[in-house]
Amino acid sequence: MITAAWIALFAPAAGTLLIALLGQRISRFQAGLVASGSTLVSFVCSVIVFVVLLGEHPEERTHSSTLWTWLSAGDLRFGAQIQVDQLSVFMMLIVSGVGFLILSYAVGYMHGDPEERRYHAYKALFVFSMLLLVQAGNLLLLLAGWGMVGLSSYLLINFWHFRASAVAAGKKAFIMNAIGDATFALALFLLIQRTGSLDFATVFKEGVVDKGSAAAILIALGLLGGAVAKSAQIPLHTWLPDAMEGPTPVSALIHAATMVTAGVYLIVRTHTLFELAPDIQDLAGILGGITILLAGLIALVQTDIKRVIAYSTMSQIGYMFLAVGLGAYGSGLFHLMTHAFFKALLFMAAGIVIHALSDEQDIRRMGGLARNLPWTYRAFLVGALALAAVPPFSGFFSKDSILASAANAGTLGWILWGIGAVGAFLTALYTFRLLFVVFRGELSAFAREHLHVPHFECGLAMAWPVAVLTVLAAVAGFLQVPWGWKLVDEWIDPVAQSAEEATGLTLTFSVVVTTAIALAGIAVAWRVWGRPNPLPERLRRRYPWAARTLEEKFYFDTAYDRAFYEPTAQTAAFATRYVEEPVFLRSLGELARGVRLASDRLSTVQTGRVRTYALGVAAGAAILVLVFLAVS
Amino acid sequence: MPGPSIAAYLIVSVLLFATGAFGVLIRRSPLIVLLALEIMLNAGNLALLAFSRHSGNPDGQIFALTVMVVAAAEAVIGLGLIVAMSRQRVDLDVDKLTSLRG
């Protein structure tokens, strides 16, 4: 069983190596098959591991295995060690399963790109890194996977390296993530200082740090910093919308389904450390709540189809943070799973639309595509219904599970429940705005000119993963049903005991209210964007400052520019002008001029006449003789 | 076998050396300069031999032989250069050969 876990981990790495080493000897299509095939191997192995774990007693499902000592320094020893338990298997299934579907889709989507092989190699590298992250048996290896997903994300965001904006977006993502990586690493240093180890077993033992002590707070804060950066939560979120510069399957896999949810995984994995610092855990929930609102509002005015979905991703991860911040680990992970399904689906459907319109992403030029892309429309509709949490689609069950937990978590819980409910309205609103603007109404002039619909609307390679995800996005919610069963909670509980969900009247209230709110959001979206309506324009004219704030994304980018970039640039310009030029450049220039002048003078000594030299030699000898005589 | 004292030999040697050095310094024909150089070398040889005889140590004589070999080799190269120069129709005047001026 543990062998299967190791194979699951290393299969994508082998795929990457194979593509890199074979180079031109395999066709681009074969490179794609190697990448998706290696991920399929991972998925099959993950299923095997899952089935074996199912057959074991819930308390004895944690296995760990060390291949070799990876790193040792003094008393510290870190093994190349994986841990298989309910949580890591849950993540392995999502990563390799959704990963396999998206890699298969990418074979069709990237078809014809001149650097396709490099793309597939990076994709497989990402799956390996992500599996390393979720399978790691100690925090150091987890950090290694954490850094490697950042690297693969960087490589894939600026995959189209000839676009300046893509390169800038890649750098931005890397730098924002590096901030999180740094706080994460600092937390690990503190842990090593306190416990002398980073093994899960040692670190998560009770009483390694005192509850509420400064050390506990700092450790939790460092981990939270890492999670916030990786999961694009406020205030380290600005990289995610820009990351949409990457190819659409990258956005689907990395920036929707898997990598950005790593923060949620980290918090659940280290939940014992967070529970030692309850204030910081609350902070995670509050940051999630703020992100839900701000990202939902920004999504309302974005005009790039992928950016709307990206802001939606931020806001949905906000729900997951809200859940894990309140201790509802099962609900958070459940939403992570359903979100992986329906958000990957939305991205892939958006990719089909983008392809059909010769790479146009601006929704103002789209419209009326439902008639020409009927199946894409249906897939998108299922994804949108799931995202807007309409029963019985998957998002309803998972979001509802989160809100029901919030309703049971005291005053802070009720505040966050309110935020979540408002967020549910915003979610329905922006999702169906996107749907109506892109698919309903008259076919737009741009679309009439550029629309090109291949077989199955996108080619078979892209069609079948979308179909599978459509089914998953529709039905995956039945894993956890209010008043019924809670399979995800029960599965995760031995690793991370979830907080109680609300029951009885509170649960009924929560379910009814949030569903009504979601439906209201859809209705409003229909009124406003379903048919020509002057309301958005009127609002824009009436409250120009509000429209401007939203379009400027609450000025986060501007503020960071003012606070960090501009002072740095100004200091550098100042130093160039007043330090480097006078002190270094000019002084060096003067020095060189002096040397040149001196050697000019000196070179006149060299007359080129043999007789002068001979005289010099003779005179020198004579002087030496005189000196010797004088000395002796 | 009494003969002139060592001082006499050294005086002759110094006179020869001074003649050679003076020749190198004032003559402009490379041929004569080469000749003057040979005179200087032989002045050195004479001093070596005189000291060798004076101290009864044959090392000086051996060294003088070595100097002669070097002088012969130098003459070959020097004369070869002078022949080559005249073939190239370069003026045989050391003061005009100043292309290495700084």
Image (cartoon, rainbow, N blue to C red):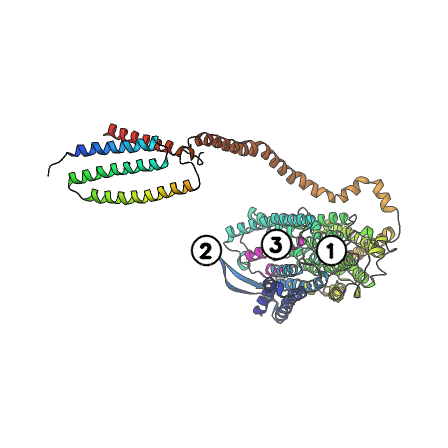
Residue A503 image position (x, y, % from top left):
74, 59
Of B31 and A418, the residue lying toward us? B31
> Residue A403, which numbered label?
1
Chain ID, mark 1? A
Residue at 30% from the left image edge and 32% from the top image edge: B21
Q: Main secondary structure of the magenta part?
A: helix
Chain ID, mark 2? A
Q: Quadrant of the C terminus of chain A?
A: top left
Number of the front mark, 2 or 3: 3
Instruction: Give the residues drawn in magenta, as a range.
Output: A130-159
In space, the residues marked 3 and 1 are separated at their CA atoms by 34 Å
Of A122 and A287, the residue lying toward us? A122
State left or right for residue A148 relative to residue A457.
left
From this viewpoint, is residue B10 visible?
A: yes
Residue B80 image position (x, y, % from top left):
37, 44
The residue pinned by badge 2 equals A75
State left or right for residue A165 relative to residue A136.
right
* Amino acid at the residue labelled 3: Leu
Q: Secondary structure at mark 2?
A: loop
> Few, some or many C-alpha atoms within 10 Å of disc 2 (few <14, some 14-19, many ≥20)?
few
Up/down of A529 relative to A543, above or below: below
Of B41 and A526, the residue lying toward us? B41
Up/down of A7 relative to A516, above or below: below
Number of the front mark, 2 or 1: 2
* Amino acid at the residue labelled 1: Leu
The residue pinned by badge 3 equals A151
